[in-house]
Image (spheres, helix red, strand yellow):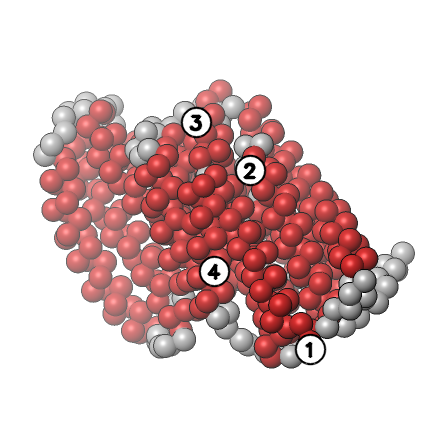
Amino acid sequence: MFEISVAEMGLMLLIVTGIGGFFMAFTIGANDVANSFASAVGAKAITIKQAVAIAGLMNILGAVILGGNVSMTLITGIINPGNFASPDQYVLAMISILLAAAVFVFCSTVLGLPVSTTHALIGSLTGLAIFVAGWDSVNWGMMISIAITWVASPLIAALFSYLLVWFIQKSIVGDGGAGSIVRIKRVVPYIIGLTMGILLYFFLNAGALRRFKEFEVWEIVVLLAIVCPYTVLISQGLVTFWCNRVSDNLEGVESVFQRLQVGTSSYVAFAQGANDVANAISPLFAVFLVVQLHGLPSEVGDYSVPIWILILGGAGIAAGIGILGHRVISTLGERLTPLTNTRGFSVDFSVATTVVAASMAGIPVSSSHAATGAVVGVGLYRGVKSVNFGILGGIFVAWIVTLPIAAVVAVGIFQLLNVIFALPEPVTPPM
């Protein structure tokens, strides 16, 4: 039996946790790519190979620019590191949490189940914290808030996508006859301008950018006032170019939205990198703080996630997307409800805006929840019978069982590591 010591084995522990973080990021990419490009693939806007390539790049960008916002919430907002017996025990717990969540999500990916990686991480985190440090180690107020967002995010995304597809149908598609292309030229550039405005706002407030400059409110307003109108003008020329090459009917409308959907799917991939990368890097970040700063996360104050950790997480997600991402795409993109390009566009825009807004607020929402809710929203627009509730029920059950299973796996891995390394006995949780 070996004795673990952060003071003597800090670098090795950091390397081991880094490998675990990369593996967790890999499983996130393999599973959650469905959230970003499933609707685009289902609507035949892009092939699976094209989807995994673009999604990989956009996930890395999202991770580096916005990925640090949620990480501190996960390691200090949900549990109290000070309740652990020692920094050594805390580090071993973080390694166990990473391995448990990664193994669970990896097995789910192989089975083609779109489980929530956020559920897996938080289930492992809270379950092991309770086992090792007692019920008081969990911030139950924060957990209730997160649970509320898990319910609210799919509902918000569903409502958003329902209203957006309704708007597109009423303002652009109409009866699908002549005049649709004219309406596209008039309306779509403003949708693109709005999207660019949202992205610019989030970018200017991103944690990564604030390392170099803190923008005042008036500066953000001025930049938005300049960029958005120019985006609309440029988009008018681009949309006109597309429209002049399609027929003035429903098929032509779908052809234009096919091009637009590649952009909105990239927007979703960016959002996924911004939010979901925290599931992989937050335990690694916690170990980094203990090893490098010689203090628990709750003791070091406001410390930004190092860029190399964000890049490691983004690269792991990209690798998972490229190697195993195709396994999950079909479940959300082709089986839950039939998707056209206009409906897929509505799904993507709704998911991305919901998830990126949560990332900016530091809230660890589930992109799986938002994606599923948005797909259901556009399905309900066509009628209740358009939604495959059998598939939806299976996804819902997978979400529910993720929390306890991930918790049990985390405890099992911790106990196994506890046999190998000499650590204090776990505190028995108060009854």
Question: Can you identify the residue that label 1 sits on?
Answer: 7
Q: Is residue 336 above or below residue 232?
A: above
Q: Which mark is residue 114?
A: none
- For label 1, count other residues whose C-alpha is less than 10 Å away and answer few (under 14), some (14-19) or many (20+): few
Q: Compute the Cα span from label 4 to label 1.
A: 24 Å
Q: Is residue 83 above or below residue 162?
A: below
Which residue type carries mark 2?
Thr
Question: Can you identify the residue that label 4 sits on?
Answer: 312
Question: Can you identify the residue that label 3 sits on?
Answer: 334
Q: Compute the Cα span from label 1 to label 3.
A: 52 Å
Horizontally, is 261 left or right of 75 in the view? left
> Quarter of the image containing the C terminus?
bottom right
Indicate the position of residue 216 as horizontal and vertical percent values.
Answer: 35, 76
Q: Residue at x 48, y 70 (%)?
A: 306
Sequence-first tag of 1 and 3 = 1
Q: Are marks 3 and 4 in contact (CB under 8 Å)?
A: no
Q: Nearer the viewer, mark 2 or mark 3?
A: 2
- For label 3, count other residues whose C-alpha is less than 10 Å away and answer few (under 14), some (14-19) or many (20+): some
